[in-house]
Image (spheres, grey):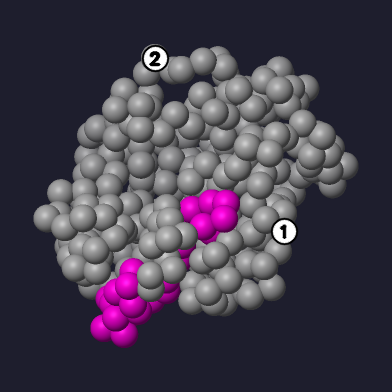
Amino acid sequence: MEKRTLGKTGMQVSILGFGGSEIGYDKVPQKTVNEILHRALDAGLNVIDTAECYRDSEEKIGRAIAGRRDQCYLFTKCGHAAGLPFPDWDPRLLEQSIERSLRRLQTDYLDLVQLHTCSEKILRQGAVMEGLQRARQAGKIRYIGYSGDSRAALYAIQTGLFDVLQTSINLADQEAIDLTLPLARQQGIGIIAKRPLANVAWRTFEKPEDGHTPSYWDLRGYNEIYAERLQQLDYDFLKGALRTAIGIALRFTLSVEGVATAIVGTTKPERWHQNAELLAAGPLDPKQFEAIRTRWKAVAKPHWIGQG
């Protein structure tokens, strides 16, 4: 598996990472999580990304990689109460959330902790950053990141306080390519792409009957947003074989300048390896990459902002 440098952190990360939302929201059994992660680690995975609010995702990951902690980078996110007795973004919440993530993930340090879709208003108040900086000074976290999109992400970059930006980059979500990534690259900020496959929303162009739980769907609605955009973008290659389309979509995201790793979640033990195989073809052909970008610029509406 190819490795790339995650900006100024210097971490050499696998270009395909593992995202932990599905294993939490879809209640994947521990045995299956073990198989997913062990097979992926054996195949070259070294980036595991999760969050405090993905139900029991952190605990499942912690149990799965016990004994293999030194083979991967552990990234998580904080900011939402998710069972703790404080309001979102309260500095006390952040402190307890990080401590809980350390326990759940069975580690004494986290490679990256990210503010999870924190608003620009909260960022401007400064307290959340101070909390993360204290945790870093205490040796509990190595690097500080911002996970989010659009104007809030741009402000986060402008503060100069973040080491990493995790943001949405895919066929149906390209705002970041022009709005935030140029400045992030200029500052040496590491770039992580989330939702690189646009949730494969082109499969049905309708709300799925399975997959994420209804509560997660109602909260996010990403599939509906992406499906609507993809219908209007009308990329020809999405009308062909699913595996081919997934390969093009994933390679498009990883061909965006500065992207170090793309985070993909799964509930199936074979899926990460299948996606990794698609990347063996290398970066997307420049002509096809530019055709996708040209189509986006011609069709995208002003309200097609990044989906945090």
Q: Quadrant of residue 129?
A: bottom left
Residue underneath mark 1: 257
Q: Is residue 231 left or right of residue 290?
A: left
The CA span between labels 1 and 2 is: 36 Å
Residue occupying the point 16% across, 57% down: 86
Left or right of residue 130, residue 259 in this image: right
Picture residue at 54% right of the left edge, 59% below the top: 153
Q: Which residue does the numbered mark 2 point to in the structure image?
A: 209
- Image coordinates of residue 21 in percent, x first then y, are 36, 42
Amino acid, disc 2: Glu
Of the image marks 1 and 2, the number of the one nearer the N terminus: 2
Residue 240: image quadrant is top right
| Label 1: element kind | loop
- Image coords of residue 127 (percent x, y): 32, 72
Location of residue 200 in the rendering, given as x and y in whole percent from the top left corner: 55, 28
* Residue 57 seen in render: no
Residue visible at 64% across and 27% down?
A: 229
Q: Secondary structure at mark 2?
A: loop
Q: Report x, y in % for residue 58.
A: 26, 51
Q: Is residue 89 magenta?
A: no
Q: Nearer the viewer, residue 253 or 132?
A: 132
Q: Which mark is residue 30?
A: none
Give the side of residue 132 with respect to residue 147, left or right.
left
Assess whether residue 130 is covered by the magenta stretch. yes
The residue positioned farthest toward the bottom in the image shown: 137
